[in-house]
Amino acid sequence: MPYVRNANRGDLDAILEIEKLSYKKPWDKRAFMCEFSKQDAGMNIFVVYYNEETCGVEGYACGNIVADYIHILNVSVAPGYRRKGAAGKMLGHIEAEAFQRGLGSMTLELCASNGEALDLYKKRGFSVSSRREKAIDNSEDELIMWKKIL
């Protein structure tokens, strides 16, 4: 049965593979090692969606704690496991942990053309607060979304 748990360095290869399959410009190993360092220092929330039956990571999500809010950096699910609830469960876990830490809100950015992600975030209570024109590679608009949690 899949569940959300804190990411660990043993998950890195699976995270890198999901990253590579999910983004045109994927993060490299150093970027994720930085996120693990932030996790060690209590400066972020970094989780995986782990399937005990297959002993595999099906998705990951991470966000940095900034003052009194959390900035979601990445939410990614492996292609074969998308649209089955993993992203929503990881977001819910991050939100619950952020609430426990006394953080008042969550924010994230996404490509305006990513309709599936936009729908997910709206269902999770995020609202579009602003739009940056051609912010992604000088060609695609980016949406800024926020959600209050306290």
Image (cartoon, rainbow, N blue to C red):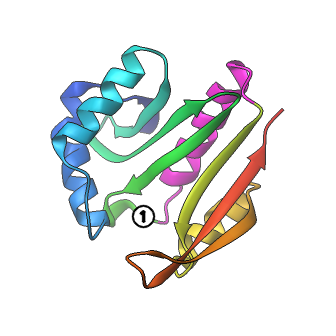
Which quadrant of the structure image shows residue 94? Answer: top right
Q: In this figure, what is the number of numbered marks?
A: 1
Nearest the viewer among 25 and 79 is 25
Picture residue at 72% right of the left edge, 67% below the top: 130
Residue range in magenta is 83-103
Q: Quadrant of residue 29?
A: top left
Q: Position of residue 125 (x, y in %)?
A: 77, 55
Coordinates of residue 37 in the picture (x, y in percent): 32, 22
Q: Is residue 81 above or below residue 56?
A: below
Q: What residue occupies the far top of the structure in this picture?
A: 41
Residue located 40% across and 22% down the image:
39
Q: Quadrant of the C terminus?
A: top right
**Quadrant (top left, top right, bottom left, bottom right) of the N terminus:** top left
- Left or right of 65, for residue 61: left
Query: From the viewer's perspective, is residue 57 above or below residue 144?
Result: above
Residue at the far bottom: name it.
139
Q: Position of 17 compared to 96: left or right?
A: left
Amino acid type of the residue that numbered disc 1 sits on in the rendered structure:
Arg
What secondary structure do most residues of the magenta stretch adopt? helix
Quickly name the residue at label 1: 82
Residue drawn at the location 26% of the way across and 41% of the way down: 31
Residue nearer the viewer, 58 or 24: 24
The quarter holding residue 48 reads top left
Helix, strand or loop for disc 1: loop
